[in-house]
Amino acid sequence: MILQVEGVTKRFGGLQALTEVSFELRTGEILGLIGPNGAGKTTLFNVINGVYRPEQGRIIFRGEDITGTASYDVARLGLARAHQVVRPLHELTVQENVMVGACYGREQHSLREASRLAAGALDKVGLIDRTDQPAGSLNVAQKKRLELARALAARPYLLLLDEVLAGLNPSEIAAMMETVRSIREDGVSILMIEHVMQAIMAVSDRIIVLDYGTLIAEGAPEAVANNPQVIEAYLGDPNLTAQLMAE
Amino acid sequence: MDFWKRPGFWFPLLIVLVWGAVVLVVHQALMRETAFILLMAVALASSLNILLGYTGYVSFGHIVFFGLGGYMGFYLLSVQGWSLIPAAICGGLLSAVVAGLVGSAVLRLRGAYFALATIGINEAARAFVSNFGPFGGPIGLSINFSAYQRYGGAGEALWMTFILLWILTMIILVVSYLVKNSRFGLGLLAIREDEDAAMVMGVKAPRAKNITFMISAFFPGVIGTLYFFKNGNLEPGDAFQLTMSIEMLVMVMLGGMGTILGPMVGAVGYQWLRGYLLTTPVFKDLHVAVAGVILLLIILFVPAGFIGWVRDNFRRFKMVLE
């Protein structure tokens, strides 16, 4: 078990963003996290990697309680993240961006080692020919790949991917999914948020569903897709939907 | 790191080395005074750049460290009878300690809030020193002329102060280069670009910012001691001039923040302009206003500063213009 989330509750003033969320992620697994907009998915990521501290509950990463640990310390323990809204370090080159990940990630590399690792990570995500370009000059798809390379260069045990497919065209999605699979083959466990259903259904071992801050379903992709509660969360009342579809 | 092989490391250093050597060889008091003021501007701007250029935090009251360090060093020199070098180092250390303490609180603020807080610190320090007995209160301190005897008379003491400032400027340039091109510096640049993303990547931002603030405050403290030793007296009004803080910012922005050569070019360029304005009847009371307009124009049209602009437009100079 690489990650255990136990009864996590997070409030922002009067807004209950997460209510008693519990789940586990097995080592080597790809776990998909889905849910309608505003369900609390990104908040859950922020709680896991220490950006927010939960009001209740515990986060256990590789047997260690990391609840409330600062995000930079969490990164050092081997938990890396790719953001939904890409956050490249604009003025730095693509390579320097990835080197930050390598220098300050789990293995704390020197600059020389980091530049070697960066080349490997950039090769993996297909950005190797952009090495010396300023990160701000990349297009959206490339910036998403850069986020991924940066997270990979940290050599994490667990990778949090927040909508790495959003804004990509179908062929870019297919390429990205291949990359995600190959990362898992390198032994990295993955927790990913995604809205592109076909993609996440195809790549995940298991899926968990969040709605209004509560976990409403968990299981194999097909089971989750046919779960009436999940359909209701996305589409409204399933009977009504069926009726409308029939008409 | 094989930094000593890189032209970007040597180029700014060589300029200062040759410059100071020429002044020493010519051995003319007027030339020395001009060079002193210019080198001091280069050293102050380069110190500020370590914070401003690498972390992106705008310290609007950075002159406070020049004032506090200057006071501490000057007190040790004039009242306690210390010799110049240890007194100057202690002045720097006091500034660094104050920066460390203040920084752990105000570096939590970002953007304009941080800038405002630093102005507050400068004013608070001025008010404190004006009422602090050992530092002479509002009257300030002055040095007994006999103190210069130790260095072979006032004339010799002035030359020695110049040499110390000259060496110090080169040390600052080396430190600035090393910070920028180290693993630590990469973390700072990540903070400058996106602090939250940097922390998620594992950069220990609070500590890194605090250390940088301390380095950036240490040197102005040493410079302050040297400057006031040369002047022979010191008052609260001279030590904590907010306009000097703004001028430091203009110099860094003019030359190009985040570069090694930029603050140097900016400092010399600004001092030249300032000299011209002060000696031109129309502008002589307006030089700070002109500095403000320059700052505005740079931020609007050339945010990368002169060196940044050259680097971006003439790629082949990139090697030399670190």
Image (cartoon, coloured by chain):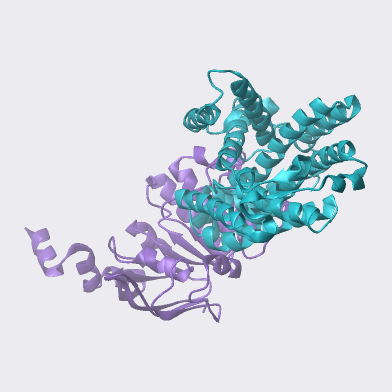
Front in this rendered view, residue B215 or B237: B237
Q: Is residue B18 left or right of residue B315?
A: right
Front in this rendered view, residue A167 or A63: A63
Q: Is residue B247 above or below residue B99?
A: above
Q: Which chain is purple?
A: A
Does residue B292 appear in this view? yes
**Residue B309 horizontal/vertical position (percent):** 59, 28
Q: Is residue B125 above or below residue A229?
A: above
Q: Is residue B34 left or right of residue B276?
A: right
Does residue B177 appear in this view? no
Q: Which chain is cyan?
A: B
**Residue A214 horizontal/vertical position (percent):** 30, 74
Front in this rendered view, residue A218 or A101: A101
User: Residue at (72%, 33%) from the top-left corner?
Assistant: B37
- Say which quarter of the image contains residue B317: top right
Q: Is residue B171 left or right of residue A177?
A: right
- Say which quarter of the image contains residue A187: bottom right
**Residue A204 horizontal/vertical position (percent):** 42, 66
Placement of the C terminus of chain A among the 4 image quadrants: bottom left
